[in-house]
Structures are given as structure tokens and as C-alpha cells.
Image: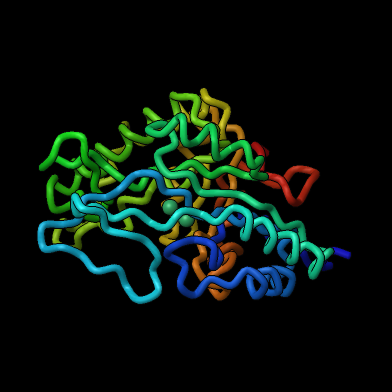
Amino acid sequence: MRHPSADLPSDEHVHSEFSWDAVDGDMEATCRRALALGLPAVSFAEHVDLTAWALPPGGWTPPEGVRGSIDGHGRFLGAPLDVEAYRASVERCRALFPDLLVRCGIELSEGHWHPGAVRDLLRHGFDRVVGSVHALDDLRTPGEHVEVDVGYTQRAALDVVAAYLAEVRAMAAGDAPFEVLGHIDYPLRSWPADAGPLPWDRIEEQVRDTLTVLAASGRALEVNTSLPMDLRVVTWWREAGGGAVSFGSDAHSPGALARNFRDVAAAVAAAGFGPTGDPTAFWGRS
Ligand SMILES: [Zn+2]
Ligand SMILES: [Zn+2]
């Protein structure tokens, strides 16, 4: 039986110990918490990062427990997803928690840059693919890339946001196999304090253009609740013709599952989206 008070949306963007950076990830504990919260479904979206990041000029040491490697060119790449072990863990959790829908998904980073590798990977048949951008062109070395937070050491703050949105548009306009765009507001997580408040009026047009391209592609927009997202974006998504919204906590530990979901879901409902007949599905236009 579903939790009787289940009115929260599914969490469609969750990391467990199978993501290279989720040092506190715990799939089983996450599923147990999902049931306790009354979530209809949890979609694991484990990192698949195929783009190596050039390190900042001062170098960088991965935090304790983070899995990845630094190559001879000084680039960091997160450890690849162990698909077989991941699948086995999902199956185990499905058996342990038959009342919870557990999706076996991935967060695919810059899929449009790696079509061959993505084709191979998708043969595994994942239940959900969140498409994300985490990297920008490296302005120091042509052909290389940097994580978005390092991008702020190379570009003016607003230019980071502009470059990010341009890359998202390129990804959304292409045929990379993802069904929902992850965290369109990702650069704001590392927005520099000394840049002052984000001038939304100066990025509104770029955000709207990006949402228009995404809507035309038929994909969904994720409302990522880790910041949480400015709800103006959801209003613009509706005005751009966007059809579906997903909710993603981007939790990297069980305690962050469905963070802020009650408040954010109420705000998204006020912006004109709501649950469909299937509580495990994305929200649609209401
Ligand atoms: Zn991400
Ligand atoms: Zn994520």
C-alpha cells in the first residue's frame, strides 16, 4: 500500500553510493527514508561523467572518499559508474521495499559531447536519464573543459551563467538521449558572493530562450530543490510552452532526500503545474 498521506511528488534526482562524489550515499537508507516520507517513487540518477575537468591553476585534491582520477594532463575525471553493481543494488532494494517504485537512472553529463560513449552506455536501458551540464570550455586551453565553479576564475560572473545557458541550449537542441534537464540553475550554486545578488533582469532573456529550446524538444524541466530554484523560472517554463516538471533534490545522502519538496511543490502548483493521474510520473500543466 502507498503511504496514505502521499502527496509529495517523486524525487527524480537522487544519488547513492554508486555516484563517485556521494561519500555519504546509501541506497537502502534512501529507500527507507522515501517510504517514511511517503514518496511515491525515487529515481536514482547516478553520475555518468565523461568530460574530464582541467584543474584550477592552484591544483585540487579530491575530498576524502571522492572516487576519481587525475590524468597526466592534470585533468580530473570522476570514477565510472559500475553499472552491474548498481543494477544489483537497485534489484535488492526493490525486493526489500516492494511498496516503493525505485527507478534505476543516471545523471548524464554533457551527453551531447560524447555521442559514441553514450550510445554504448544506454544499451543498459536505464529507467530515467537526467541530462546535465557541469562543464564549460576552458578559456586557458582550447579543447579542454573546466567545472563550472572553476569557470568563475576565467570569466566574469554573468558570463559564466551565459556560457552555461548557451551550452544547455546546445544540449537541448541536440538528440542526446535524456528526458529531463537537470538543474538549469547550476551556476548559481557557486555564484561568487562578491558579485552581489544575481541580476535576473540581465539573464531573463537567455533563460527564456533556453526554456523555449527545451520545450520544443519535448523534454521536461527539473526543479532542483538544492538551492532551491527561483520559481520565476517555472513561470517562464510554462510561458515557453513547457509540458512537464520533475522534482529533484539532488540528494547525495539519505537525509537530503526530497529536501524542501513540500514548499517547492506548492509554489510549482501555483505556477500552473500539477500531478497527473499517476503519482510516480512527472507533473504536467494544470
Ligand atoms: Zn548535477
Ligand atoms: Zn546530481
Q: Whole-percent x and y of residue 242?
A: 55, 32
Q: Whole-percent x and y of residue 10?
A: 67, 56
Is 201 in front, or is 188? 188
Quarter-wise, where is residue 32 in the image?
Answer: bottom right
Is 144 in front, or is 103? 144
Q: Say left or right for 66 vs 129.
A: left
Q: Say left or right for 276 vs 232.
A: right
Q: Residue furthest right?
A: 1
Count numbered badges in the picture.
Answer: 0
Is 51 in front, or is 207? 51
Q: Quadrant of the C terminus?
A: top right
Q: Whole-percent x and y of residue 187?
A: 31, 50
Q: Residue at x 66, y 40 (%)?
A: 125
Look at the image and tell me whether residue 172 can be seen: yes
Q: Residue at x 54, y 28 (%)?
A: 241
Is 257 in front, or is 273? 257
**Is 159 above or below relative to 216?**
below
Q: Whole-percent x and y of residue 126?
A: 64, 44
- The way the protein has been coloured in the rendering is rainbow
Look at the image and tell me whether residue 208 can be seen: no
Q: Quadrant of the N terminus?
A: bottom right
Q: Say left or right for 168 vs 116.
A: left
Quarter-wise, where is residue 178 in the image?
Answer: top right
Q: Residue at x 67, y 56 (%)?
A: 87
Q: Residue at x 15, y 63 (%)?
A: 59
